[in-house]
Amino acid sequence: MITSTTTDRNDDALICVSVGIIAWNEEEAIQAALQSLCQQTLFEQLHQRGLRAEIICMANGCTDRTTELATRFFEERATDPLLAETICWRVVEVPERGKNNSWNLFAHCYSATNAACLCFMDADIVIHGAETLWRMYCALEQTPNASVAVDQPLKDIAMNGHRSFSERISLATSGMTRTALAQLSGQLYFIRTPIARRIHLPKDLAACEDGFIKALVCTDFLTNRLCPDRVTLVDGAAHVFQSYRTFRDVLRNQKRQMIGQTIVHILIDQYLKALPMSERLNMAAAIQARENSDRDWLKRLIARHLSSVKYFWRLFPNLLRFRYERWRALPLAKRITHLPSALAGYAVTLLASRMAFSFLKQGSINYWPDTRSPGLKQFVPSRAATSSSERLLSTTVQP
């Protein structure tokens, strides 16, 4: 059963952008996320064009006050003339927990039929700067070759004037991650609607749904060679998320990443690539049909893969090299300063991979550690402060 609370919707044909917020137990962060969203100039720009947007909060399996707080937020802004004329909204309660299920429901069932693009947003981030979403929208509009527009994820500690040694290590690690081509952060991105509707996220894809989407988009659904230009990084666009504070949390997140990358490897490099061309061109239908006929199909693929993997460092190709390659991609001076971060990250990857290997060997795949983001409220600027926030973007991205 799925229930929703909604305002009156105007003609669906006028909705140009559909924003889907994926939320699971985010009562501490949802209001900050929504406030930063409603401050975006995207809605003013669409209004000037005679277009509209919709915001749909997909509250999946929530056991806290996420739904209540999101509903109250929009009800309190119902008298804002611009928002009332430009945005229609609803909060959808999805009883089944799971980001992938909510992603599929939003992309295929709830988003406006005629929307030109979909914006996916996590409920535990704050959009940095009032122009971010407008710039991302324009990037897709002005770059025909691109299917996805992404911004730059900023750890909250990047805003600190005085950073501890561990915070510098964390930021340097993020800097190395950005050296990889076509980085797609699942926390916030725009995707052309026709592309999104050719994707169906497998139910048992435990993590790294962004890696799965990137692989399909950058290979034209596994029909061509890798084309990183399908994902465009937008200048001056960013969002803030709360970084992991303890070694335990960092390790748990890396374990989840290793599980996710393993499953993406099994799907992209082994199973889906072997499908007939007709099914690859209709990927969403092919995956959904498989799930409908055999609910455990992916679990069996994972078990088969693990039976052929003797060592944990062979969970997926390049497991031992990807951090080294990111470090090597840095300029020489940064290679020296980032060496401690590279070594620390390599050690964490090995430990997390061993934990992921043991976890998967036990037949488990559902691993999603509960996280909280109570500190994001301080990163929501007032509309009067947005110009200074834009200037901060150029200074806070440096580790």
Image (cartoon, rainbow, N blue to C red):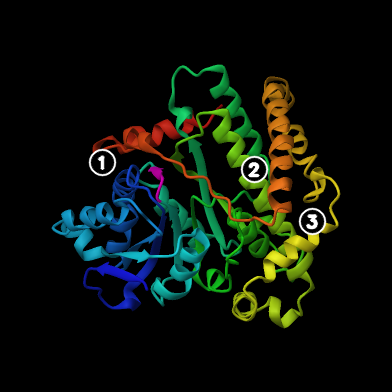
Could you tell which of marks 1 and 3 lies nearer the N-terminus? 3
Q: Residues within 10 Å of mark 1 (few under 14, many from 20)?
A: some
Front one among 114 and 259: 259
Picture coordinates of residue 349 (x, y %)?
71, 37
Q: Which mark is residue 255?
A: 2
Residue 124: in magenta span? yes
Q: Which mark is residue 138?
A: none
Identify which amino acid the numbered label 3 is placed on. Leu
Q: Is residue 10 left or right of residue 171?
A: left
| Main secondary-structure element of the magenta-colored stretch | strand
Closest to the camera, between mark 1 and mark 3, is 3
Q: Which residue is mark 1?
A: 383
The kind of residue tagged 1 is: Arg
Query: Crowding at label 2, few (<14), some or many (≥20) Cα neighbours within 10 Å?
Result: many
The residue at the point 38 percent across, 73 percent down is 112
Mark found first going from the N terminus, 3 or 2: 2
Residue nearest the viewer, comparing 224 with 316: 316
Residue in the foreground of this view, choosing between 294 and 336:
294
**Is the residue 172 above or below the residue 70 in the image?**
above
Residue 19 appears in the figure: yes
Which region shows up in magenta?
123-127
| Residue under pointer 3 | 306
Residue 178, visible in the rendered structure: no
Answer whether labels 3 and 2 touch (C-beta < 8 Å): no
Q: In front: mark 2 or mark 1?
A: 2
Q: CA distance from mark 3 to mark 2?
A: 16 Å
* Residue at the image position 64 percent from the left and 39 percent from the top: 177
| Residue 190 spot, x, y in % from top left | 49, 59
